[in-house]
Amino acid sequence: MIIDSPLKIRNITLSNRIVLPPMARELSEEGKVSDELIDYYQKRADGTGLIIVEHSYVSPEGIASKRQLSMADDSVIDGFKKLTDAIHAQGSFAIAQISHAGFESMSEDKLNLNEMTPEDMDEVRNAFIEAAVRTQKAGFDGVEIHSAHGYFLNQFYSPYTNKRTDEYGGDLENRIRLHNEIIREVRDRVGEDYIIAIRLGAYDYLDDGSKLEDIPIAVNSFIENGVDLIDISGGLCRYRSPVSKEPGYFKELSKIAKESCDVPVILTGGVKKAKDAERLLEEEYCDLIGIGRAFLMDAEWSKKALYKLRKIE
Ligand SMILES: Cc1cc2nc3c(=O)[nH]c(=O)nc-3n(C[C@H](O)[C@H](O)[C@H](O)COP(=O)(O)O)c2cc1C
């Protein structure tokens, strides 16, 4: 059985291959962690290899929803510290996802990536970097940069939305330039022992969107610049596949990523049953499996899944 085998990433060893993927719970109080939120994560951390905490905005202009968590200033750090302590107390590990919603933001100062000036770019780049540094101060084991589901960095990645004519638009190297600048600077600031993950909206399923052949190039470029963990999801199609409802519906995308690189790859989407999770791992579509909505419904998903699979063996 693979699902209950450990996996080392940088200096931590996950106890198993189950991941709680980031899911916005809308339970924050003015951007800060609430007791209800701690309770939600604590319950799911027991028996789960890795918890990726839902996206937190890096700056107020990047807010995606009213009760989203914030990583935009130091006042949030103490609350997150309580959250990471609670997750660690269950023997699990915690990664914080940081995001900017770009033109999907609910703020009035929406950023249109195609109209951004060099000063605007500096501001957002710095917001990502400072937010990543904050996650480390809050006791997380790593940070995940959100570049999926049509948000800001995904808007840069996708040629469907990125129409810039400077060095941040056009070919793939340009469309991931901002990602890599952020990754390099974050690595510099957090040191060698901190995990940097990226959630890559790997494919848009649109004629003019991102291409499957971009995946290996982007993934390896991110790794060269400092990424340790690749988390595969959908791009402008968001977290559902427009072409499949099968368990692991993004598996072709994660397979391409996994075959092209030597860091762990997470696959998430449509997996509800323990046996499907194990099969996707056995068939080498991924190294870690994300269980989202099924885990939302059942806080004991991990424990029950491992119990069921051990009984079958
Ligand atoms: C309520 C809800 C909130 C979500 N919030 C986030 C988020 O904050 N960041 C993110 O990258 N994905 C988010 N997602 C996507 C999930 O991480 C996951 O990819 C998606 O639910 C598909 O997996 P599943 O079929 O196992 O649920 C969210 C999904 C749901 C249902």
Image: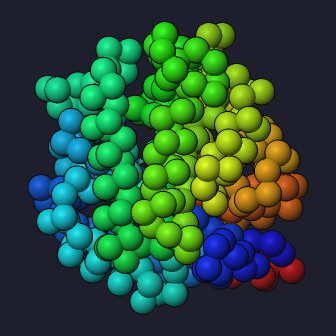
- Left of 200 or right of it: where is 255? right
Q: Give percent across and percent down for residue 311.
A: 78, 82
Nearer to the camera, 158 or 174: 174
Please give the count of numbered marks on the rendered protein.
0
Residue 269 lies, with reference to residue 87, above or below; the image says above
Q: Between 124 and 63, which is closer to the camera in this rendering?
A: 124
Looking at the rendering, in which quadrant would you find the N terminus? Answer: bottom right
Residue 80 visible to the viewer:
yes
Residue at image coords 77%, 27%: 213
Quarter of the figure that contains the C terminus: bottom right
- Name the residue located 50 percent from the left edge and 69 percent from the top edge: 191
306, above or below 207, in the image: below
x%, y% of residue 182?
46, 46
Picture coordinates of residue 291 (x, y %)? 58, 58
Q: Is residue 270 visible?
A: no
What residue is shown at x 55% (from left), y 66% (from top)?
195
Residue 140 lies left or right of residue 207; in this view the side is: left
What is the basis of the colouring in this image?
rainbow
Residue sitting at 48 percent across and 15 percent down?
166
Could you say which quadrant of the image residue 196 lies in?
bottom right
Side (left or right) of 197 relative to 113: right
Residue 88 in picture, x, y percent from top left: 44, 84
**Of the pair 177 and 271, the residue shown nearer to us:** 177
